[in-house]
Structures are given as C-alpha cells and as structure tokens.
Amino acid sequence: MGSGNAVEYSGGALVWDLVMASINVNLPQQSYEIAIGQGTAPEGAIAPEGIGQLGEMMRNLKLGKKVLLVSNPTIFKHYGESAVASLEAAGFEVASCTLPPGERYKTLSSVQKIYDTALLNRMERSSTMVALGGGVIGDMTGFAAATWLRGINVVQVPTSLLAMVDSAIGGKTGVNHPQGKNLIGAFHQPRLVLIDPEVLKTLPMREFRAGMAEVIKYGVIWDAELFAEMEASKRLDQLRYVKPELIESILTRSCQAKADVVSKDEKEAGLRAILNYGHTIGHAVESLTGYKVVNHGEAVAIGMVAAGQIAVELGMWQKEETERQDALIEKAGLPTKLPAGVDIEAIIESLQLDKKVKAGKVRFILPTQIGVVTITDEVPSDTIRQVLQKMQ
Ligand code: NAD
Ligand code: GLY
C-alpha cells in the first residue's frame, strides 16, 4: 500500500510531497497495476507516476505503437497536452477524440464517434485506447476498446474522484439505454490504471462530493477503518478541507478494496455484487430523473440511505450505525432525501429493469455492521415503499 509523505495542509491549496502507491489487481488472465502518484515532483526528486509518466509506463507494458486518447473538451484542455506529450515522448503515435461531457452522452452514438476515429487512424489489434476522464469517458472508452476488432488494449487515466476509486478499476464498461443505466456493456479489464491525484484540483466541488459517495460505500461494505478515518475528519465536502493524509488514505484504501473484491470475483458471480451497495435504488433515481437532477454519486448516496433504512426495518442493522452512515453522507455534502417529484411507485417498477434483478427478484446489498454487508433478494416491496416515503 501507499507510502505517502504529505507535508503540509494549508487549508487552501493542496500541497503534497510525493504520494505514491502501487496496488495490484490480480486476475487469472491478466493482472494489472493501479499506480497512484503525483504529476509534478520537487526538483531533483525521482519522477513520480503522474500523467507525465503515462508514456513510459505504457512503453514498459510493450503496447503497440498506436494510441487513441479519448476525453472530453474540458478535461482535454486541462490535461490532454501533458498526456499526449508524454505518450509521444515515449514513441507512441497518438490520435485523439473528444466527446461531449455528461451522463446524457453515455450512449452508443458517442461510442460510434470513437469507432470512427479508430477507423480513420487504423487502430490495430495491438493498439491502445486511453481514457482520460471521469467515469463516463472511462466506461465508453472501455466499451469501445472491448468491441473494436473484438478487443484491443485500454488504459484508464481517471480524472474524477469517482473514477479513481471505482469506475476505472475492475473492467466494467458500457453505455446507457434510454430505458436504463449501463444496460449495454462488456467486461474488459484495463492494462493499467494511472491515478494522478493532482488533477483533483480542477474537479468541480459537486463532482468531488459524488466521488465521496463511493468512498463512503467502501467504508460501509468493506473497510471499517476507512469509515473511522472519515468520521474523524471535520469536513469531507471539499478537497481543500480534507487533509492530504486522508486523501491518500481515501485513494489507496478505496482502490485496495476494489482490487481485493475484483480479484476474488472478476465477473460478479457473487462477492462483487457488494460493490453495488446503494446502486439498486440509486440507479432507479438516476434514470427516472433523466440523468439531469442528480449525478451518479448523489444517486448512490440516496440509495445507501435507503438501503440502510431497509436493513434497519428488516432487523439486520442497528439504527445507530445507520445514523453514523447518514452523518458521513451529510458531512460529504451529499443528499439524503429523494429529489422532489420522483414517484415512489415508478422507482419500485424501475427496480425490475435493473441488472441486479435475478429471477424477477430485486437484489439488495444490505449492511449488517459497518464494514460488513449481505446480499438478499427477500426485501418486500412494502418495506421499500415505506422507507422511500420517509425519504421524501
Ligand atoms: P463524469 O465522467 O460525468 O465526470 C463528472 C464531471 O467532472 C464531468 O463534467 C467531467 O468533465 C468533469 N471532470 C472530471 N474530471 C475532472 C477534472 N480533473 N477536472 C475538471 N473536470 C473534471 O462522472 P463520474 O462521476 O466521474 O462517473 C460517473 C459514471 O461512472 C457513471 O456513468 C457511472 O455509471 C459510472 N461508473 C462506472 C463504474 C464501473 O465499474 N465501470 C463504477 C461506478 C460508476
Ligand atoms: N461499481 C460496481 C462494480 O465495479 O462492480
């Protein structure tokens, strides 16, 4: 795990010494590294593993010469040039493609644009697509790489907190169908995940909070120590108020949690389903509000509150621990109530479309104590209804 030396907490700017970690995702077919490092090293220091190291790290993997970098215009403006420069310096031929930002554009027609650029630039079986962006870019680029020529390399360079701790790791790729989230997709593991925490400085505050939802998820489902570290922090709602030591812990412990779970159950035969904690109701809320009202992290926060309450109603979780979870969600500036106007019956109906439905029964991930969850499909609709009514 990480051996970071955070040196200063300025209460304003984020000032770090080198923070480095290397976590392995161990898989039967092809294991890969999650490298966490800073983009700018103090003079004379050993070059860290930030975006500036992308080219060299990919060269070490002996990937083919051609690279297609996929991003969105905002992220490309910030980091595209450094990524391209690093790749070219390492001898890669780089083409790039930008897609409009936002969940609304996580569609097959956006992926078509990636294919068009891949065709134009004659991307081959040995070529690599690099996703430089949040979860939306990561999921679409991963899907394009999974399907172009029946599968080429993909490298994930996540730029949002959510993508760093969750979506860039584990090989789930895909796009939305108008009727439901992530209904079209494929498992396609990256060859490398490169996390440069420096880029979080330009991440909008609302997106930082969204990422915190997935971090809180790991605390509840897997890592009680991470949960306690977050409880001890005065604030969690803005990057600049979170101590660098805690940011380092958030990144390394979350990535480790995801790597552990994915290494044990790559294709979600069992254990991996626990990563969907908060997502059952979360996905329904997201899609019923047209991906316009809440973002993915906010929807997961609402879903975790609901799942916690359901667990209490079913006598599985202590009320006091649910309250601790909800307090953390609030401290991160995330919603704990349903967005106005969402119809509860529509949520219950839309649960049937979720990928987590098995033999017509909706699968819920429910906590039994902080750090431990169980999977059940025995949640009566009336309990869901009752809990959601209290969240209006
Ligand atoms: P996102 O990709 O839409 O990014 C959020 C916003 O932040 C975008 O506007 C983006 O342009 C901006 N942004 C990202 N990084 C930035 C930076 N460093 N500086 C400035 N702006 C930046 O949303 P997200 O929260 O990253 O990802 C959500 C998506 O991830 C959803 O589609 C969700 O389904 C998916 N997801 C996938 C998995 C998986 O396992 N594949 C897991 C969790 C979530
Ligand atoms: N975020 C769910 C998963 O990766 O399995």
Image (spheres, helix red, strand yellow):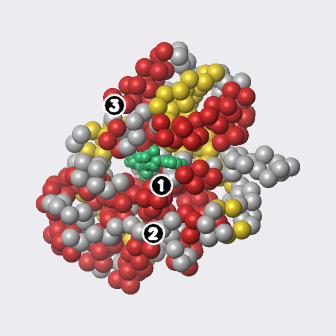
Q: Which quadrant would residue 174 be assigned to in this image?
A: top left
Q: Which percent across, then down, holds residue 32? A: 62, 42
Q: Nearer the viewer, residue 57 or 75?
A: 75
Q: Which mark is residue 108?
A: 3
Q: Residues within 10 Å of mark 1 (few under 14, many from 20)?
A: few
Q: Label 1, on which residue? A: 204
Q: Nearer the viewer, residue 55 or 62?
A: 55
Q: Residue at x 71, y 60 (%)?
A: 16
Looking at the rendered structure, the number of numbered marks drawn on it comes to: 3
Q: Which percent across, then down, holds residue 148? A: 46, 24
> In this rendering, would 336 be left or right of 116?
left
Of the residues under marks 3 and 1, which one precedes in the sequence?
A: 3
Residue type marked 2: Ala
In what element is the residue under mark 2?
A: loop
Q: Which percent across, then down, holds residue 263? A: 55, 50
Marks 3/1: CA–CA distance: 26 Å
> In this rendering, would 359 be left or right of 187?
left
Marks 1/2: CA–CA distance: 14 Å
User: Does ligand 1 reach within 8 Å of label 1's beta carbon?
Assistant: yes
> In this rendering, would 74 be left or right of 46?
left
Q: Residue at x 73, y 28 (%)?
A: 89
Residue most extreme to the bottom:
320
